[in-house]
Amino acid sequence: MLFLIILVFIVLIISVILTLVITGKSDENYRSSVKRNTINLTLIYVVIIVLSLVALGGYIWWQM
């Protein structure tokens, strides 16, 4: 179980890093709005992380 939790966090960190790298490699029109897009992606990741932790906590709670 601990292995799977660690694996999820590793995949999450890699996803965040790759997303930020990809957002820097685009055409000129995209670069003008990169700040807004990065903020939106960050908010999405924050919401997903919070929901995942709540789901994980609920799962652990009901397994006891």
Image (spheres, grey):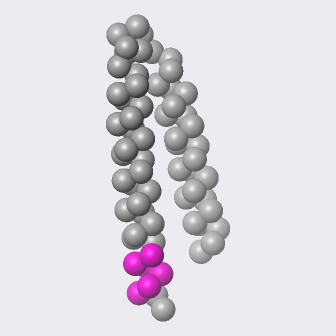
Question: Which residue is pictured at 40% across the width and 25% down the height?
Answer: 35
Residue 13 x/y as whole percent: 57, 47
Question: Which residue is pictured at 50% across the width and 17% down the height?
Answer: 25
Side of 40 relative to 16 (left or right)? left
To which quarter of the image does residue 53 belong?
A: bottom left
Secondary structure that dominates the magenta span = helix
Residue 3 x/y as whole percent: 64, 68
Question: Which span is picked out in magenta?
Answer: 57-62
Question: Which residue is pictured at 37% across the width and 14% down the height?
Answer: 32
Residue 2 x/y as whole percent: 63, 72
Residue with the most extreme bottom position: 64
Question: Which residue is pictured at 47% across the width and 81% down the height?
Answer: 60
Nearest to the observer: residue 37 or residue 11: 37
- Circle count: 0
Nearest to the observer: residue 34 or residue 7: 34
Is residue 16 covered in magenta? Answer: no
Task: Assign the N terminus to one quadrant of the image.
Answer: bottom right
Residue 29 x/y as whole percent: 35, 10
Side of 47 relative to 19 (left or right)? left
Reply above or below: 41 against 34: below
